[in-house]
Amino acid sequence: MIDEAKKYLGNALAHSKNPVALISLGKDSLLLLYLLRELGASIPLIWFRDKAPQETFRVIKEWGLTLYSYPPAVRYKVENSVVSEYSIGDARLPVIRDISDEGQQVGTNTLAYFHYSFDTTFYGYKASDEISLVSRTFEPEFQLGPTRMVAPLYHFTDDEVLQMIEDFAIPYEPFNDDALDCSLPIVPIETFRQRFSL
């Protein structure tokens, strides 16, 4: 399975002019990053968070990573999750995080536009991922604004990802970065799903 994922990733890289990877340093994106490194791909890494947690510093240091970050265009609450929308050209990418009982103040950031010049965006999505706000499974590839979203780990399960992290001695540090403040604007789940056709 890992060889198939590497072959799929290599083929997608070969057909990309300006690729990028979305990295959270959780288990899925770490395995994706490991595969990129195995293929000798040196591409930009975008961190879709406000700051990297302390637990991730070890892998950043050991692998000599440089992560680029920018704030969301808007952030709001839907049921028990916080949605941060990031500008991808004239499209929006929703990043969903659960709310902790001990939330930290995050406020609401606004950003009018982010110039997203990448034609291919790799990310650690799997078909087995369950997201409470989303009522469907995404395809392994789809177009989002100016970029092609590509999920090389699409056919993996959580257990398979964790097993490969152990097998390849990937420096993974489990952490919970989902502590968010609950005092954000509230959007009904029906409105959110209609906005993104979910």
Image: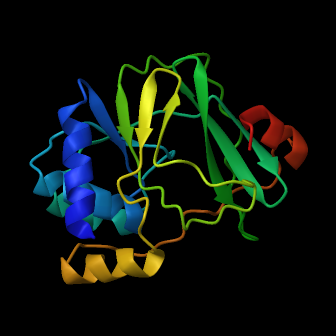
Image point 54% across, 63% down: which residue? 177
| Corner quadrant of residue 180 | bottom right
Question: As drawn, is 59 to the left or to the right of 64?
Answer: right
Quadrant including the C terminus: top right
Q: How is the image coloured?
A: rainbow
Image point 21% across, 42% down: which residue? 11
Nearest the eye: 59 or 21: 21
Measured from the top left, where is residue 195 in percent x and y? 78, 33
| Viewer can see residue 54 | no
Measured from the top left, where is residue 139 in percent x and y? 53, 47
Labels in figure, total: 0
Nearest the eye: 1 or 68: 1
| Corner quadrant of residue 197 | top right
Image point 75% across, 55% down: which residue? 135
Outermost residue toward the left in this view: 40
Q: Is residue 138 above or below residue 159?
A: above
| Corner quadrant of residue 166 | bottom left
Question: As drawn, is 144 to the left or to the right of 68?
Answer: right
| Viewer can see residue 58 | yes
Measured from the top left, where is residue 153 in percent x and y? 38, 60
Measured from the top left, where is residue 66 in percent x and y? 24, 43
Question: As drawn, is 24 to the left or to the right of 12?
Answer: right
Image point 55% across, 68% down: which residue? 128
Q: Is residue 90 above or below residue 20?
A: above
Quadrant including the N terminus: bottom left
Q: Is residue 108 above or below residue 119?
A: below
